[in-house]
Amino acid sequence: MASEKQTATARVWRLSHGELKAEAATLIVEEPLEIAVDGDLYSVVMRTPGDDLALAAGFCLAEGVIESKANLGSIQVCELENANQVSVVRTGESLPPLRPVRHTIVSSCGLCGRDMIEEVVKRLPELQGDCRFALSAVLAMGEQLQQAQQHFRPTGGTHAAALFDQQSELLSAAEDVGRHNALDKAIGHLLLADRLREARLAMLSGRCSFEMVQKAARAGIPVVASVSAPTELAVDLARRIGVTLVGFVRRETLTVYVDRGRLAELQ
């Protein structure tokens, strides 16, 4: 059975009120969980390990895979070492029809979605160090992101993403109830305008997960910064493909998780 480790540590650079220090940071763990239904893979979800049975049960109810607990004939975690899979077998006379598989991947119990991640990494470009930003500029772009959030102020219910060029000029910004959607929209605006090649930094309003780094890399954006924390898997991906990753961008403070030669003060 896979480990239920929920946090990890990393060495980072932390800027606080003008002083830059090397420190240790705690990262939340993010790993894939396969959910199999009636013997077939149904979905792969990214989650923090722990409470996997509860997650799978709640997911199946929310997705309409089951109507109630009575439809859960069995639900169990794969007992193979390093496996992240929950198997659900449904029971009942009138079961809801299964929707199309949410992720089409080839995997099996024990691979725990890591084949999917490795395939994603193989398809991503390695980002080259063709830009550089001062930490003060990163802080200023964080302020611009907040100013661009028109709907957050009255509702408190949106995420936002903003894309900047090498001169820290705002190229596009978008809001959405979903943080992934906000980044997709910001990237899409530039893609449709044939200006995506100008984007060098993505500023995010929420937690920076594996998928957010993946989206930025696919768009060729070498620097990702967020007002919140990255996950362990996001930091690992950034290191592997050459993305500069900055978190906790808030007024006079930020934390550098991965540099790759793009932050002036760290040269």
Image (tube, rainbow, N blue to C red):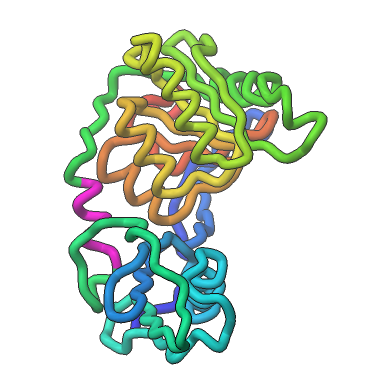
Give the magenta range: 113-121
Residue 196 visible within the image: yes
Residue with the most extreme front position? 94
At x 58% / y 80%, what residue is drawn?
Answer: 68
Residue 87 image-quadrant placement: bottom left
Magenta residue check for 210: no
x and y, in percent, of residue 222 in the image: 35, 27
At x 44% / y 51%, what residue is drawn?
Answer: 11
Left/right placement of residue 145 relative to residue 210 reads: right
As drawn, 264 above or below 154: above
Residue 128 image-quadrant placement: top left
Closest to the observer, 96 or 151 = 96
At x 64% / y 28%, what residue is drawn?
Answer: 18
x and y, in percent, of residue 148 in the image: 66, 20
As drawn, 246 above or below 40: above
Closest to the observer, 94 or 112 = 94
Closest to the observer, 21 or 28 = 28
Magenta residue check for 116: yes
x and y, in percent, of residue 34 in the image: 35, 70
